[in-house]
Image (tube, grey):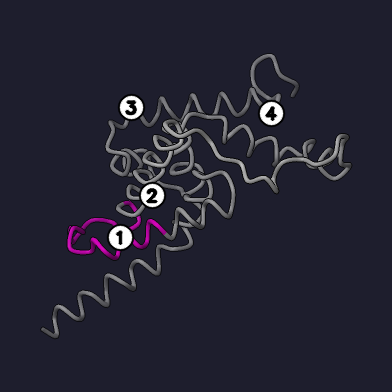
């Protein structure tokens, strides 16, 4: 019984160690900090409730990235069926431009983030895993359960879309 308790403690410690990377990944998938934190919380809840399904010897971060990706896919499917809901307080109540918003819209970082959110989910996940999280193509392929060539293709398409959207791709401003 003591061995089971030690295994559980090791598992929980590994989950805690993976949280910073998981948070970045979830925020990237969701598009903003609030939705990303909600996705991360759901991911951790699912991981802890299904700890018995974790295979020893597997990377816990990859396992949790996959859980997050599956939850994101489920949420996207749900949104397609129900339509996107916008809280009334998020609707603009005045007409005109806000100077701060205009300035932020000009920022490359904001443009890149918007471009990333416009990339299809499967390409965005590959981009986040390889570029942001630093996983190898093989590791990303294992997380997303696709061939390495698919990761390379999705990554190239995501990079091209982002570069084009921020005006640095073919035909865009340099």
Q: Which residue is mark 2?
A: 68
Residue 8: give x, y in percent of width and height. Answer: 23, 75
Could you give the CA–CA distance between mark 2 and mark 4, rounded to whole angstroms?
27 Å
Please identify, in this view, whether the residue under mark 3 or under mark 2 is nearer the observer. Answer: 2
Left or right placement of residue 25 versus residue 8 in this view: right
Q: Secondary structure at mark 4?
A: loop
Find residue 123 and name its label.
none
Q: Which residue is mark 4?
A: 166
Please identify, in this view, whether the residue under mark 3 or under mark 1 is nearer the observer. Answer: 1
Q: Residues within 10 Å of mark 2 (few under 14, many from 20)?
A: many
Q: Earlier in the sequence, mark 2 or mark 4?
A: 2
Could you give the CA–CA distance between mark 3 and mark 4, rounded to whole angstroms?
26 Å
Q: Earlier in the sequence, mark 4 or mark 1?
A: 1
Highlighted range, magenta: 42-62
Q: Which residue is mark 1?
A: 47
**Dot 2 and dot 4 residues touching (CB under 8 Å):** no
Please identify, in this view, whether the residue under mark 4 or under mark 1 is nearer the observer. Answer: 1
Q: Earlier in the sequence, mark 3 or mark 1?
A: 1
Q: Earlier in the sequence, mark 1 or mark 2?
A: 1
Find residue 149 and name its label.
3
Q: Residues within 10 Å of mark 3 (few under 14, many from 20)?
A: few
**Dot 3 and dot 1 residues touching (CB under 8 Å):** no
Q: Residue at x 39, y 69 (%)?
A: 16
**Dot 1 and dot 2 residues touching (CB under 8 Å):** no
Q: Residue at x 51, y 46 (%)?
A: 132
Could you give the CA–CA distance between mark 3 and mark 2, rounded to whole angstroms?
22 Å
């Amino acid at each position: 019984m003591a061995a089971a308790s030690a295994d559980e403690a090791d598992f929980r410690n590994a989950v805690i160690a993976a949280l910073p990377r998981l948070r970045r990944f979830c925020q990237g998938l969701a598009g903003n900090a609030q939705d990303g934190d909600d996705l991360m919380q759901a991911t951790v809840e699912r991981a802890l409730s299904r700890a018995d399904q974790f295979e020893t010897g597997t990377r816990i971060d990859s396992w949790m990235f996959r859980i997050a990706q599956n939850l994101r896919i489920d949420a996207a499917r749900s949104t397609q069926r129900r339509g996107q809901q916008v809280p009334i307080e998020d609707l603009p109540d005045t007409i005109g431009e806000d100077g701060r918003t205009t300035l932020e819209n000009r920022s490359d970082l904001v443009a890149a983030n918007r471009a990333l959110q416009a990339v299809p989910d499967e390409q965005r996940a590959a981009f986040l895993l390889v570029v942001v999280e630093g996983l190898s193509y093989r590791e990303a392929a294992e997380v997303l359960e696709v061939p390495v060539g698919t990761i390379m293709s999705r990554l190239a398409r995501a990079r091209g879309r982002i570069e084009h959207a921020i005006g640095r791709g073919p035909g865009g401003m340099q």
